[in-house]
Image (cartoon, rainbow, N blue to C red):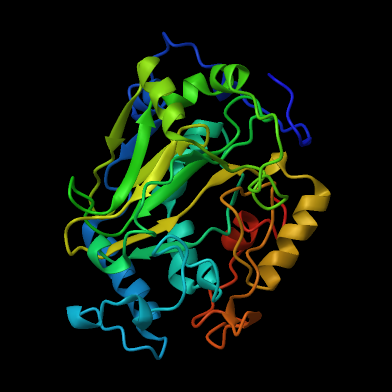
């Protein structure tokens, strides 16, 4: 690998990192290892997924801003709390609402990650929810493509696999995930040929596992046999992708309210004692963090606003979830609060 500006601790790897291309698993792993992503059908029933979506929209309607899922005239940015890229709620303790933890502890959601990593002793990210308004409402800036990957060039191999639990329809014209198919396998080659050589604003502590791509980079991947794919899924499906895969969230042309929960799991054994203590503290404070479950444990902090040129607290910020989760042993182990 070409040298770059930051140093990261060594991260454990598992046998999945050294996959023999000739191996056939007869399940989602064949597609995942070939393409860098996969859709696992029906990890939740459609009925259960729609129940979870209803709870997500209950949460959004709980803010006193006028949003009403049944009245499209209220589907405006000013009627919902602040979010990132038009729907990612990084604040307001969104990551720890009971319905979010209920989804994270669903056996059907956990099982594919247990298969990938070869263990059911996992920790989960304190990642957030995404409730995205249609592009014609969100506006041009927020709905622009933002191709990126969520693994720093310094990290070698498959060490993070991200997940989306889909709670709404995600057809060709609906909002959803776009991936550069097969780009994960070219991760090392790309950064060898295109090293990070200068100061870059995104390579802060919080965003060290975030790397944005320029249009010329998309051309590089296309020249190496990759193609952009809008991933289609139904309510109750799980979408997983290698964090080395180029991807972004696409806004829909339809009126579907894209509703998803991000859920990423990695082996608990990969987490150091120091990281475990930090993760416990983040959990006790109901903090939302990055996509990474076992490392890069940085909080997004409290919501703020700019008023008269000064940063001030967002009055909508919350210090605890609207509905707290039940602190079961299963949840606390996934949260890294108690050991396996």
* Residue at the (26%, 61%) spot, across then down: 135
Residue sitting nearer the eye, 133 or 143: 143
Q: Is residue 328 positioned above or below 290 on the image?
A: below
* Residue projecting furthest to the bottom: 64
Q: Is residue 62 positioned above or below 87 on the image?
A: below
Q: Is residue 101 positioned above or below 240 on the image?
A: below
- Left or right side of 113 for 174: left
- Residue 85: x and y in percent read 43, 60
- Residue 29: x and y in percent read 40, 27
Occupied quadrant, residue 279: bottom right
* Residue projecting furthest to the top: 22
Occupied quadrant, residue 157: top right
* Residue at the (63%, 72%) spot, across then down: 286
Q: Is residue 306 positioned above or below 14 on the image?
A: below
* Residue at the (60%, 21%) spot, across then down: 15
* Residue at the (66%, 62%) spot, across then down: 299
* Residue projecting furthest to the front: 309
Residue sitting nearer the eye, 200 or 170: 200
- Residue 47: x and y in percent read 22, 63
Query: How many callouts does the rendering have?
Result: 0
**Quadrant that contains the N terminus:** top right
- Residue 253: x and y in percent read 19, 56
């Amino acid at each position: 690998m070409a040298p770059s500006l930051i140093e990261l601790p060594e991260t454990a790897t598992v046998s999945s990192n050294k996959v023999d291309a000739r191996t056939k698993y007869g399940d989602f792993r064949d597609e995942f290892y070939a393409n860098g992503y996969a859709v696992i059908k029906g990890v939740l029933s459609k009925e259960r997924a729609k129940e979870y979506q209803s709870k997500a929209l209950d949460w959004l309607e709980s803010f006193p801003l006028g949003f009403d899922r049944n009245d499209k005239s209220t589907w405006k940015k000013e009627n919902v709390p602040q979010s990132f890229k038009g729907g990612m709620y990084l604040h307001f303790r969104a990551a720890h609402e009971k319905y979010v933890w209920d989804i994270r502890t669903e056996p059907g959601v956990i099982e594919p990650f247990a298969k990938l990593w070869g263990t059911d002793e996992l920790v989960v990210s304190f990642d957030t929810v995404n409730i995205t308004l249609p592009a014609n409402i969100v506006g041009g800036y927020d709905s622009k493509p933002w191709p990126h990957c969520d693994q720093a060039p310094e990290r070698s191999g498959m060490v993070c696999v991200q997940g989306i639990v889909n709670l709404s329809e995600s057809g060709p014209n609906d909002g959803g995930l776009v991936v550069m198919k097969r780009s994960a396998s070219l991760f090392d080659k790309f950064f060898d040929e295109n090293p990070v050589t200068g100061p870059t604003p995104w390579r802060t502590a919080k965003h060290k596992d975030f790397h944005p791509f320029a249009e010329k980079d998309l051309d590089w991947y296309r020249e190496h046999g990759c193609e952009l794919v809008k991933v289609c899924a139904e309510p109750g499906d799980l979408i997983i992708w290698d964090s080395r895969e180029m991807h972004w969230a696409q806004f829909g042309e339809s009126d579907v309210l894209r509703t998803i929960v991000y859920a990423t799991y990695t082996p608990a054994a990969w987490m150091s004692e120091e990281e475990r203590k930090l993760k416990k503290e983040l959990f006790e404070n109901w903090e939302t963090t990055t996509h990474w479950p076992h490392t890069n444990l940085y909080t997004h902090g409290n919501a703020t606003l700019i008023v008269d040129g000064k940063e001030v607290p967002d009055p909508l910020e919350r210090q605890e979830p609207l509905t707290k989760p039940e602190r079961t042993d299963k949840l606390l182990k996934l949260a890294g609060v108690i050991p396996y």
